[in-house]
Image (tube, rainbow, N blue to C red):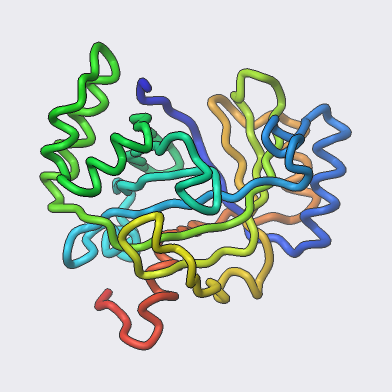
Amino acid sequence: MKPFYRFEFKYLVTPPTARSIESELKNFGMKLDAPSVLLGDGYYVTSLYFDSYDFRDYQDKCGGFKKRKKIRARIYELFLDKSSSVLLEIKKKIGERVEKTQLKLSREEWRQFMDKGVSALMSFEKHGPEKEVKDEIMRNIIASSARPQIIIRYKRKPYIASTSGALRVTFDSGLEACRKTDFNQNIFMAPIDEINKKGIILEVKSNYAVPQWLGRIIRDYNLKADAISKYAYGVEAVFRHNPLLR
């Protein structure tokens, strides 16, 4: 998949506020994204994050660097055997602007990658834009000496304004994490109470300027943008008793 760009804003809201905002979104024509319609109340997002041995990407986030990245693999299921594919991603952020590069791998390709690392990626036959994406991901993994470190999972309820996906508003809840290195090992997850006890993460994702009506909702509910990082909170949850240096 070609890289795509958008702006992201995150807010932490209480469950009652989230329900009220959902009603307002529906009044302005936003609808649940297709998978959520089928499942009723959202779907699970499970991400396996890669980082260096000294957790450099985590350190960059904690240091407040405006320009930073995350390398992760993602499935939209609880477990790998329920997913037909895996998205290998690099998410780069400069301020509020996000660039995401994604490479879709079959389950067999993912298994080979887990067994052999970057050498397996090199052997995969990809062409055109997919090859460029593969090379970009390989360069970042090699440059960072990145390896699987943390699994983070949560329930997502997404609303879209149209089939183009140019505007998405998502509600993420029930965050949990574990110190494992493969999707098949994510049975015993620890809740990320630092977030869960405060509420739900509301994210506004837009390719363009936020529409006036959505800006009005944000102001009416007195929402304050917050630099929430699920990855950073997940790292701190699993290292609660032996914190990493910051």
Of the 4 image quadrants, the one containing the N terminus is top left
Number of callouts: 0
Q: Nearer the viewer, residue 78 or 192?
A: 78
The residue under the point 77% across, 40% down is 216
Q: Is residue 145 left or right of residue 111?
A: left
Residue furthest top as drawn: 128
Q: Residue 2 at x, y = what percent?
A: 36, 20
Q: Nearer the viewer, residue 68 or 107?
A: 107
Q: Nearer the viewer, residue 147 or 245?
A: 147
Of the 4 image quadrants, the one containing the C terminus is bottom left
Q: Residue 18 at x, y = what percent?
A: 77, 54
The residue under the point 18% across, 41% down is 140
In the rendered view, tell whether residue 51 sits above or below residue 120.
below
In the rendered view, tell whether residue 88 sits above or below residue 5.
below
The residue under the point 87% across, 43% down is 23
The residue under the point 70% across, 21% down is 162
Q: Residue 103 at x, y = what percent?
A: 33, 30
Quarter assignment of residue 124: top left
Q: Is residue 143 left or right of residue 162?
A: left
Q: Residue 240 at x, y = what percent?
A: 40, 83
> Would you say residue 102 is visible in this rendering?
no
In the rendered view, tell whether residue 46 sits above or below residue 194.
above
> Would you say residue 164 is visible in this rendering?
yes
